[in-house]
Amino acid sequence: MSQRVARLAMVMALAGWMACARAYAATTPTSVTIQWTAPGDDGVTGTATQYDVRYSTSAINEGNFGAATRVNGAPAPQSAGTTQSMDVTGLTPSTSYWFAIKTADEQGNWSAISNLVQWTTGASTDDIRPAAIAVVVGTLTDDSVALSWAATGDDSLTGTATRYEVRWSTTQITGANWSSAVLVAAGVPAPAAPGTQQGVTVTGLDRSVDLYFAVRVFDEMNNVSALSNVPRVDHLLDTAPPATPTSVATSVVTGGVRVQWAANSEPDLAGYRVYRAPSGSGPWTQLTGSPLNATEYTDTSAPDSVSLWYAVSAEDAIGNESARSSGRQVFLRAGNIATLHLQPVFPNPSRLGDVVTLPIEVPAQGPYDGRVDILNGAGERIRSIEIRGLSPGTNSVTWDGRNDAGRTTAPGVYRAWLQMGGATQMVKLVRQP
C-alpha cells in the first residue's frame, strides 16, 4: 500500500513544562497515521504520563478541544525524544480532518493544545454501500429488548460488512436525528456473511415509555447503509408503586418544620409527596402539589400547635404512589416532651461527605448544657461536641464527619453518646464511602 507522508510541525505549546514535538502523518482512505517526538515530563526531560489525541472535521482550538472526537488507544508517553506514532482509523474517505494533541504529567497538569494539522483522507474506489437491514423485535423483559436481523453485504448484498451501529430512542428515529439516539455499546456482533441471522439484546432500558430501535451497516470504507426499519416497542403498563420511603426524620428549624428521608432507588421514580396531620391517626393533609425531586421539605405553614405528625410517600413516572411512611412526630413546643431524648440520626447510613444530624428533644425543664461524644468501632472517642444552653423543644446537633483534629473519618460503624441533664443516651450510625 502506498502512503503519502506529510510533515507536521506539531509544536507543543506546553506552558514551559513540556518540550516541543514534531509529528508526521500518513493517510489511507479511512485512516491517518500520526507520528511525533515525545515531549518530557519537565521541559525536555523525564517521561510524561498520558496523551489526549483528538480529531474533528472542523478546526480545533482550546475552546472546542473537549468536543472533538477522542482517539482511543493512544500510546503511553515514552522518554523525551522518543519517536511515537498511532493510527487513527474509522475515518471517511475524501474528507478533511484536523488533528491536535495534549499531554499530561503525573500530577494531572495538562499542556496547552498543540498546533493543528489538517489532512484529507484519500479517495476510495468503493462507492457501493451496504444494503439496509430489516430489524425484528424478539423477547422482551422489564428492562431489555432482543433485536435480530439477517446480515446484508459489504457491497449491497455481497461480501461481508465491517460493523453495525445499533441505536435506540424514546422518539421516532430518522436520518436527521440518528446521531442523537443512544448508541448500544455492548453485545453488538461483527457482521457475518450475507443472510446470517444475527442480533443483540439491549439491556438497562426504561420500559415505562415507548422505545424505538434502528440499525445501520458500515463497510471498510465507512460507506453506510440506509436506515433500517424503525420498530417501536410499546411501554409496559406499570401498576407497581415505588417502595415506601424510609428514615423519615423531622426537626424544628427557623421558619418551620424540616422533614427529611432516605432516597428511593427506583429508576422510574418521579418524586415524593409530604403529608401532615395533627395526630398519629390523622387526618392527613398533602402539603406538596407535585412530586418533589429532593429528599427534604420545609413546612413553612405549620400551625401553632404543641406537636404535629409528618409522613412521606413516593410516586413513579406514571403516577403510582406508595403507601405513606410511618408518621413522625415533631414537638413545636416542649410541653409534651416528658424526658430528654436523642432521636435516630439522619441520614443513616451516611456518606463520608454528609453532615449527620442528631435530633434532640429537650423537655420544659431545660435549657441544658452537655456534649455529644463520637466513638469509633473500637470504642475510642474521636470527636467531642460541646452543647451550651439547649432550649426546650426539638433541637438538633450536627457532626461533619471529622475527628477532633479536623480530619475526615473512615467508613465504619460509630456511636454517638449524648450526655446531658444527668442522662446518657446512645445511637449507632454508619458511615459509607
Image (tube, rainbow, N blue to C red):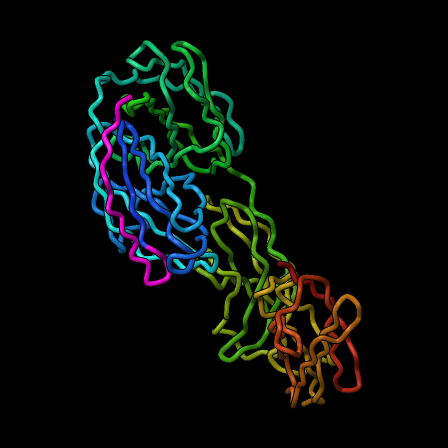
**Identity of the residue drawn at 37% across and 14% down:** 160
Within the image, what quadrant is residue 308 found in? bottom right
- Tell me the quarter of the image containing the N terminus: top left
Segment colored magenta? 1-19
The quadrant holding residue 432 is: bottom right
Q: Which quadrant of the structure image shows residue 180?
A: top left
In screen coordinates, is 242 left or right of 103? right
Up the image or down, 284 lies above or below 11; here it is below
Q: Quadrant of the C terminus?
A: bottom right
Residue 283 visible in the displayed image:
no
**Rendered location of residue 366, percent (x, y):** 69, 89
Q: Determine the residue positioned at 28% across, 39% down.
A: 24
Queried whether the magenta region covers residue 18, the answer comes back as yes
- Main SS of the magenta segment? loop
The correct choice, above or below, for 295 with respect to 306 in the image is above
Q: Which residue sits at x=48%, y=36%?
A: 205
Pick whichever, 373 or 408, lies toward us: 408
Q: Position of residue 241 (x, y in %)?
A: 56, 45
Which residue is drawn at the image coordinates 50% and 71% (left, top)? 299
**Residue 353 seen by the camera:** yes
